[in-house]
Image (cartoon, rainbow, N blue to C red):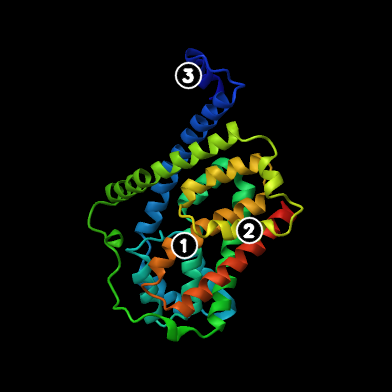
Amino acid sequence: MQFLVERVLLTPLGIPLSSPLGGALVFFIEDSVKILLLLILITHVMGLVRYYLPVRRIRSFLAAHRLFGLDYFLATIFGAVTPFCSCSSIPLFIGFLEAGIPLGVTLAFLIISPLINEVAIALFLSVFGWKVTLAYVGAGIALGMAGGAVLGSLRLERFVADVVRKDLCSCTQKRDPVLSAVSRDAWRIVRSVAPYVLAGVAVGAAVHGFVPEGFFAQALGRERLWTVPLAVLLAVPLYANASGVIPIVQALVEKGIPLGTALAFMMAVVGLSLPEALILKRVMRWPLLASFFATVMLAIIIIGYAFNIVL
């Protein structure tokens, strides 16, 4: 790909491959093509999985399997294959509670849903490889289970907002032929995500090409214990999804940021953003919302330190 970009684009424009602009353009084109192709494939595959998920039966199944933390694990798995959007998260949240599923199990679903989905997995596979992807998925599941268990032990059910249960979003209704419905939804996701992918890759390319080597390593180096909490705190006011953040994280890691610090920043951006808080305020009162954010923030910081030590 680098040879093709150089011959077709850089050479005709007179841009040296070794220049900052040349390196940034190669980074942008290579990563954009790779990520978008993988995104198209995985969104179609996961669309088939979601299409056949019997949501009401899953609620009943979770209610019946509460021994040894199995309900927390199943809730996180369900959250990983369910998109966290305004049309699905709130009805599912209320539906879980009305089905008799404990609040902690329901919160485990809410924690994991924005962190792990087909988009995040596709991007992680394309930029970090399968080992880091598996580690990230495992850490995300552990975060969801532990966070849900801690929040469940606090007995915060009285702080759930009084909202009327709504039907599940129309994306779960099976009216059209399977393949056409799945393909339509997959392409809708791709179209909505693609601008974030390209924007994120563009920022990552700019960092890759123009930021001096070692700049970020000096600001957020491995030897400073406060950098992981700082990265999480800096991420909370931001808003982006995994498709926009992961390419930036890739460029930061290449510039010397420890992987755990970069991943903690990414997880806080997609899992603790202020816009997400506004959405969750529809179903949570402030004590529950504050407990939810504080627990997830602490868990992300721990995961960041763990990744820095292990990887």
Q: CA distance from mark 2 to mark 3?
A: 40 Å
Residue at image x 52%, y 31%? 30
Q: Dot 2: few (<14), some (14–19), or many (≥20) neighbours within 10 Å?
A: some
Q: Which tag, 2 or 3, sits closer to the chain's start? A: 3
On screen, 32 above or below 120? above
Label 2 element class:
helix
| In front of the other: 18 or 147 | 18
At x 61% / y 67%, what residue is drawn?
299
Which one is closest to the eye, mark 1 or mark 3? 3
* Labelled pair 1, 3 in contact (Cβ < 8 Å): no
Residue 129, given in percent of the width and then of the height, sits at 61, 43
Q: Which residue corresponds to the image point at 48% horizontal and 39% vertical from the top-left?
A: 35
In the image, residue 90 sits, relative to residue 185, either above or below, namely below
Q: Secondary structure at mark 1?
A: helix
- Between marks 2 and 1 in the image, the one whose residue lies nearer the viewer: 2
Between 117 and 228, the one nearer to me in the picture? 228
Residue 71 visible? no
The residue identified by callout 3 is: 9
Q: Residues within 10 Å of mark 1 (few under 14, many from 20)?
A: many
Q: Is residue 244 left or right of residue 94?
A: right
Q: Amino acid at mark 2?
A: Leu
Tag 1 or tag 2, which sits nearer the N-term?
1
The amino acid at mark 3 is Leu
| Percent coordinates x, y for residue 94 in the rendering | 36, 76
Residue denoted by label 2? 230
Q: Residue at x 44, y 75 (%)?
A: 61
Q: Which residue is mark 1?
A: 113
Residue 39 placement: quadrant: top left
Query: Rounded to the nearest whole Å, what is the CA distance between mark 1 and mark 3?
Result: 40 Å
Q: What type is the residue that disc 1 sits on? A: Ser
Residue 226, given in percent of the width and then of the height, sits at 70, 59
In the image, farthest residue toward the right? 223
